[in-house]
Amino acid sequence: MIIKYIIFLIGIIWSYSIIKTQSVFSKKAGIVFKIFITKISWFSLIAACYFGYKNFTVKSTVIGIIIGVLLVNVGFYLLKKYINQRFNEKQIKTSKSFFEYTLILLVIYFVLF
């Protein structure tokens, strides 16, 4: 039972973290990210919630969802704080652009080939 609950929490954290990642990208990369990745993550999140509902009590499921969402939000906050302290604005902008264009190229590559 504990292993099932841990799997449920991992599913919630995984799905919500990918959904939350969409807000980091710019509009053009965000559109690509939204179309190809976030929709699948929403389905995964809904499936994880359904898994929790079917295997545990409603109270345990809601607590798991809240814990997962809080962990992801705290993780993103701490990561943002760390990155802003460690790197200057130019380095952040350069690396962000690199990751955005890499994401776009990877999506194009996997869709066309």
Image (spheres, grey):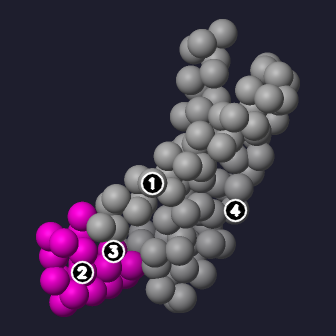
Camera-side mark, 2 or 1: 1
Asked whether 109 falls inside the magenta stretch, the response is no
Dot 4 alpha-carbon crowd within 10 angstroms: few under 14, some 14 to 19, many 20 or more: some
Q: Residue at x 34, y 68 (%)?
A: 80
State the image coordinates of residue 47 (x, y, percent, origin top left).
Answer: 76, 40
Cβ atoms at labels 2 and 1 below 8 Å apart: no
Please give the label number shown on residue 99. Answer: 3
Answer whether residue 109 is visible to the viewer in this image. no
Residue position for label 1: 74
Amino acid type at image mark 1: Val
Q: Residue at x 39, y 79 (%)?
A: 100
Q: Earlier in the sequence, mark 1 or mark 4?
A: 4
Dot 1 alpha-carbon crowd within 10 angstroms: few under 14, some 14 to 19, many 20 or more: few
State the image coordinates of residue 56 (x, y, percent, origin top left).
Answer: 78, 20
Answer whether residue 85 is visible to the viewer in this image. yes
Residue range in magenta is 82-101
Q: Earlier in the sequence, mark 3 or mark 2?
A: 2
| Separation (CA) of disc 4 from disc 2 | 27 Å
| Separation (CA) of disc 2 from disc 1 | 20 Å
Residue position for label 2: 92
Please give the label number shown on residue 5. Answer: none
Q: Earlier in the sequence, mark 1 or mark 3?
A: 1
Residue position for label 4: 39
Cβ atoms at labels 1 and 4 below 8 Å apart: no
Cβ atoms at labels 4 and 3 below 8 Å apart: no
Camera-side mark, 3 or 2: 2
Q: Earlier in the sequence, mark 2 or mark 1?
A: 1
Position of residue 31 in the picture relative to residue 105 (left or right): right
| Separation (CA) of disc 3 from disc 2 | 11 Å
| Separation (CA) of disc 1 from disc 3 | 22 Å
Dot 2 alpha-carbon crowd within 10 angstroms: few under 14, some 14 to 19, many 20 or more: some
Looking at the image, residue 17 lies above or below residue 111: above
